[in-house]
Amino acid sequence: MPSYRLMDGYGHPTDVFTAACDEEATAFGRARALDHPRPEPRFGGRRDFQVHRADGDRWRLLVAFAPV
C-alpha cells in the first residue's frame, strides 16, 4: 500500500498514512484537514491543504484543496 502525507498551508506534514488507492487517500486527507485550522494568509503561506504520495524516495503532489 502506498504511503501518503497531508500537508498544511505552511508546508508542514500533519499526518502520514497509508491507503489502498489515491481516491481513498484524498478522502482521508479531506476528512483530516477539517481537524486542523485553515492557515491565515501570510507571506510564504498557502491557504490550502495538500495530499502527497510517496514515489520512491520523493513525494509527489496528488491533490490540493481548501477545506470549507
Image (cartoon, rainbow, N blue to C red):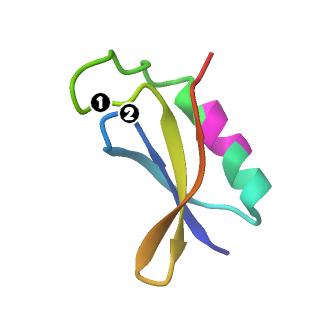
- The image quadrant that residue 22 belongs to is bottom right
Residue drawn 49% across the image and 36% down it: 49
Which labelled disc corresponds to residue 17?
none
User: How crowded is the residue under tag 2: few (<14 C-alpha within 10 Å), some, or many (20+)?
Assistant: many
In what quadrant of the picture does the C terminus appear? top right
Above or below for 7 versus 59: above
Q: Is mark 2 on a helix, strand or loop?
A: loop
Above or below for 1 versus 36: below
Residue drawn 21% across the image and 25% down it: 43
Q: Residue furthest left?
A: 43
Disc 2: which residue: 9
Whether residue 65 sits left or right of residue 10 in the image: it is right
Mark 1 or mark 2: name the one nearer the start of the chain.
2
Which labelled disc corresponds to residue 45?
1
Q: How far apart are marks 1 and 2 (CA)?
A: 6 Å
Q: What residue type is labelled 1?
A: Gly
Of 49 and 20, which appears nearest the observer? 49
Q: Is mark 1 on a helix, strand or loop?
A: loop
Q: Which residue lies furthest to the bottom in this view?
A: 56
Give the image location of residue 67, x and y in percent.
Answer: 59, 23
Magenta-highlighted residues? 27-31
Q: Which amino acid does label 2 sit on?
A: Gly
Do callouts 1 and 2 mark residues in contact (Cβ within 8 Å)? yes
In what quadrant of the picture does the N terminus appear? bottom right
Give the image location of residue 56, x and y in percent.
Answer: 49, 84
Above or below for 58 versus 36: below
Whether residue 30 sits left or right of residue 54 in the image: it is right
Of 6 and 64, which appears nearest the observer? 64
Whether residue 5 sits left or right of residue 32 in the image: it is left
Residue drawn 31% across the image and 44% down it: 12
